[in-house]
């Protein structure tokens, strides 16, 4: 995939947000509360930190963040109006799990976004089949898309959607790919973004200093845990 310099810079910021959130922010959070007897839900905090970093870093570009509510959680999509493209962040594992869930009653948000925005994307690898692997009618996906994008739906449906997928290991951020899917969630093309994992500060001259986001926010989360209050986790890796 070939992109102009502005898109490449935007992708650098997205990868940098993932890098800082899954390393510094998450490590500080775990270290701060490692003495807790149980660590239930700790993994969900990575998505919270990623979205917090995206909010800070995307503000440095001409792009914007589109927020949407998804039942018990909230999601974020990066919108590049200049180049008519949108980006979401997910783990590689979650992408593989989207179609493995049986008996899904509502679409995964990516099923709806891709069905509408990427129906114009030609997939040279597509194989003709008499079996439709998507259990939802297009109208259902389209209606769901409008619920996700609300007032921006008519504008954003003309855009192309990409997924920034990442894998982490015990040693940190392991792999980041930019993936283009067709409307049926079949992969068209992928390119590695691993070259952006180690930040090139020379190309991110206006990058703010990464300060720990965990101290105050995680303190509030701990209070919520102790009080029995349900956390409103901003989790992009939920099922729907």
Image (spheres, rainbow, N blue to C red):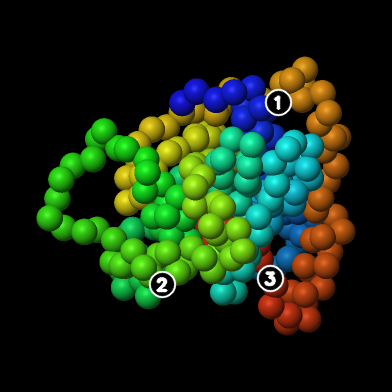
Mark nearest the camera among 2 and 3 is 2
Q: In the image as oriented, which residue stretches furthest toward the left?
A: 130
Q: Earlier in the sequence, mark 3 or mark 1?
A: 1
Question: Who's the residue at 37% across and 48% down the image?
Answer: 119
Tally of numbered tags: 3
Residue neighbourhood size for the residue with mark 3, other residues' Cα within 10 Å, grouped as few (<14), some (14–19), many (≥20): few
Mark-to-mark CA distance, 2 and 1: 38 Å
Q: In the image as oriented, which residue stretches furthest toward the top?
A: 202
Query: Residue 229: which quarter of the image?
Result: bottom right
Question: Residue 107's x, y, as percent?
Answer: 41, 66
Is residue 68 shown to the viewer in this render?
yes
Residue neighbourhood size for the residue with mark 2, other residues' Cα within 10 Å, grouped as few (<14), some (14–19), many (≥20): some
Q: Which residue is mark 2?
A: 106
Q: Are marks 3 and 1 in contact (CB under 8 Å)?
A: no
Q: Are marks 2 and 1 in contact (CB under 8 Å)?
A: no
Of residue 159 and residue 172, the one placed in the foreground of this image is 159
In the drawing, does residue 60 fall left or right of residue 169?
Answer: right
Q: Which residue is mark 1?
A: 199
- In the rendered view, tell whether residue 196 sits above or below residue 229: above
- In the rendered view, tell whether residue 67 sits above or below residue 125: below
Q: Which mark is residue 232?
A: 3
**Please, what secondary structure does the residue beneath circle 3 have?**
loop
Residue neighbourhood size for the residue with mark 1, other residues' Cα within 10 Å, grouped as few (<14), some (14–19), many (≥20): some
Question: Residue 91's x, y, as percent?
Answer: 51, 47
Mark-to-mark CA distance, 3 and 1: 31 Å
**Please, what secondary structure does the residue beneath circle 1 have?**
loop
Question: Residue 196's x, y, as percent?
Answer: 62, 26
Q: Are marks 2 and 3 in contact (CB under 8 Å)?
A: no
Question: Who's the residue at 31% across and 67% down the image?
Answer: 137
Query: Residue 220: which quarter of the image?
Result: bottom right
């Amino acid at each position: 995939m070939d992109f102009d310099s502005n898109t490449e810079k935007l992708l650098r910021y997205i990868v940098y947000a993932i890098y800082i959130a899954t390393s510094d922010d998450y490590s500080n959070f775990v270290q701060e509360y490692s003495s807790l007897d149980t660590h239930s839900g700790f993994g969900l905090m990575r998505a919270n930190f990623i979205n917090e970093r995206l909010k800070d870093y995307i503000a440095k570009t001409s792009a914007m963040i589109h927020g949407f509510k998804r039942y018990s959680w909230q999601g974020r999509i990066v919108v590049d109006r200049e180049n008519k493209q949108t980006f979401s962040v997910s783990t590689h594992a979650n992408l593989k799990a989207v179609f493995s869930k049986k008996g899904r009653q509502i679409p995964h948000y990516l099923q709806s976004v891709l069905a509408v925005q990427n129906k114009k994307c030609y997939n040279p690898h597509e194989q003709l089949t008499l079996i439709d692997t998507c259990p939802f009618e297009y109208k259902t996906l389209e209606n769901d898309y409008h619920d996700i994008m609300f007032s921006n739906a008519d504008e954003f449906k003309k855009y192309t959607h990409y997924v920034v997928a990442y894998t982490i290991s015990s040693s940190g951020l392991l792999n980041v790919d930019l993936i283009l899917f067709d409307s049926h969630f079949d992969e068209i093309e992928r390119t590695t973004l691993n070259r952006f994992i180690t930040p090139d500060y020379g190309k991110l001259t206006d990058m703010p200093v990464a300060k720990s986001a965990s101290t105050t926010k995680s303190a509030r989360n701990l209070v919520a845990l102790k009080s029995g209050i349900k956390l409103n986790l901003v989790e992009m890796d939920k099922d729907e």
